[in-house]
Structure formats: structure tokens, C-alpha cells
Image (cartoon, helix red, strand yellow):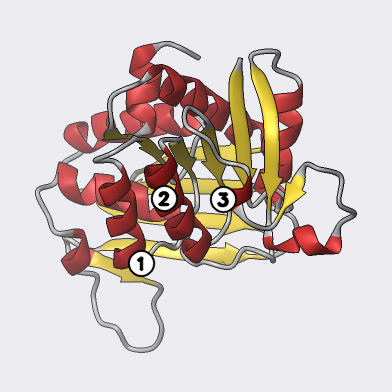
Amino acid sequence: MIALIVVGAAGRMGQAVVQAARSRPEFSLKGLVDVAANLRPTDGVWKSELETLIGRGDVVIDFSSPAGCRAAARTCAAHGAALVTGTTGLAAEDEAALREAAQVVAVVRASNFSLGMAALRKALDAALRGLPGWDVEIVERHHRGKSDSPSGTALTLAGDAARARGLSAERVLRFGRHGQVGPRPAEEIGVHAVRGGTWIGDHAVLLAGDGEWVELRHVAQDRSAYAHGALAAAKFASVQKAPGFFDIEAVLADGTR
């Protein structure tokens, strides 16, 4: 049985992971960690600090905040626990903390744990190879409470598109347009964020040619799509004894889910 600790357990994704884990007999919920724990009755499960729960061989699933992710990475490395994180909006120092932890324990990092999104990324690669020179625009929709913009998944898709064309994402990404911006540069990749309502996650990649266009789109109808993917990553991380930095593709290729 895999001992699981969920960081950010009071959040939308944290709650989805907890619910999914309770339906899977191979997981044992060792603890739930959240800064909101001090607002909940003490029941021996909810904690505000990861250090009070973690042990060697545990798997931590993190859907918290950049600061929470950074702290979880350092704590996992110090205690010999694997880490699965889907927290987005990470800065360079947060990414560095994950890379540093991956030298000691298994770290699985993904901006989106949906299996359908993994399939869309593969389809996008094929479409870009078949449609060279077409314009690329990405539109993502999320609920009004999402704190980072654009989404980590949109940035991942944009990075995929840039790499497929041998371009630097930092140079060609364009976040929205306003005013007299002039004609669209051929290499530009547009990224646009929409916020409102209760959208779980909606990502569309538009490929526009002369007189025609193609849309590749993934819509998450429920957060369980991400939660079960995160649990597959946790199972992979529990089996993966050697340290390393892994992505969702490594989890899918392994087949342990």
C-alpha cells in the first residue's frame, strides 16, 4: 500500500485527489496538509506542516502554491519521500528546488496530469509537422478563482509548439494583443487566458493557414481527470526508487497506472 500525503488538500485539486485516493485500495491517506488546517477541527489527519507527517518511502502529492511546492520539494528531499507536483505559476527558484530534490528522490512534475491532454500534445506535434508555417494561437479558459495566468498547461503547449519549430519560447510567445500592434509576425505564438464562472479547464490550440484552420481542443469536465493522473504518477514514483526528474510521459510509458 502506498502511503500518500496531499499538500494543498483544502484546495479544489487537493480535494479531488483525496476523493480519488479514497476510492483506490492501493493508496493509504497518511495525512492532509494545508495552511487552512488551523481552521479545521484537529482529527489527527489535517496538519499545517508537512514535517509532522512525512517519512521515508511516502509519496507527497502537491497542488498548493509556488511557496508550498518549494517547501515540499525540500522537505521530501530531506526525508526521502517521492514528490508529485502539479502546482503551476512556479518561478525560477521554485523550479530549481524541484531539480535539486530530484537529485535525491523521484520527482514527477506536470502542469497537467490529464491523459487526454497528453494525447493532445502528441496530436499537436503531428499537426505541426504536417502544417509547417501555419499560425499558432492558444486559448485557455479557467474558473474565476484561478490565481495564475496563463495556465501552466497553456505555457506547456506553447513551449511544445516553439520547440517543434526550433524557436525560443521566450522570444516568440505573445500574451494577448491590444492597440495598434501591427501585422502578426510569422513566428509568433499567441497565448490568451479567459477567466470566469466555473470552467475546470479548457485548452484550444488553433492552427491557421490560408483559407482553412484546424482546432485541437481538450476540455476537462471534472477534476477527477487530473486527480487519477496524479495518482498514476504517485504509483509510478513509489515504484521508481532511483532519484530523477520525470514528466507525465514517463508515467504513461511506464504503464504502472
Front label number (2 vs 1): 2
Q: Is residue 181 above or below residue 161?
A: below
Q: Position of residue 123 (x, y in %)?
A: 34, 29
Q: 223 left or right of 217?
A: right
Q: Horizontal and vertical percent for residue 49?
A: 63, 56
Residue bearing the label numbered 1: 91
Q: Residue furthest bottom?
A: 180
| Structural crowding at the residue carrying mark 1, measured as other residues with C-alpha within 10 Å and reported as few (<14), some (14–19) or many (≥20) | few
Q: Position of residue 119 (x, y in %)?
A: 41, 26
Spatial CA distance of label 2 from label 3 is 12 Å
Name the residue rendered at 34%, 21% in the picture: 241
Please say whether residue 88 is visible from this viewpoint. no
Q: Which residue is mark 2?
A: 73
Residue 247 visible in image: yes
Q: Nearer the viewer, mark 2 or mark 3?
A: 3
Q: Quadrant of residue 18?
A: top right
The amino acid pointed to by label 1 is Ala
Residue receiving disc 3: 51
Comes first in the chain, label 3 or label 1: 3
Relative to residue 196, is residue 41 depicted above or below?
Answer: above
Left or right of 102? Residue 64 is right
Which amino acid, by three-letter code, is at mark 3?
Answer: Glu
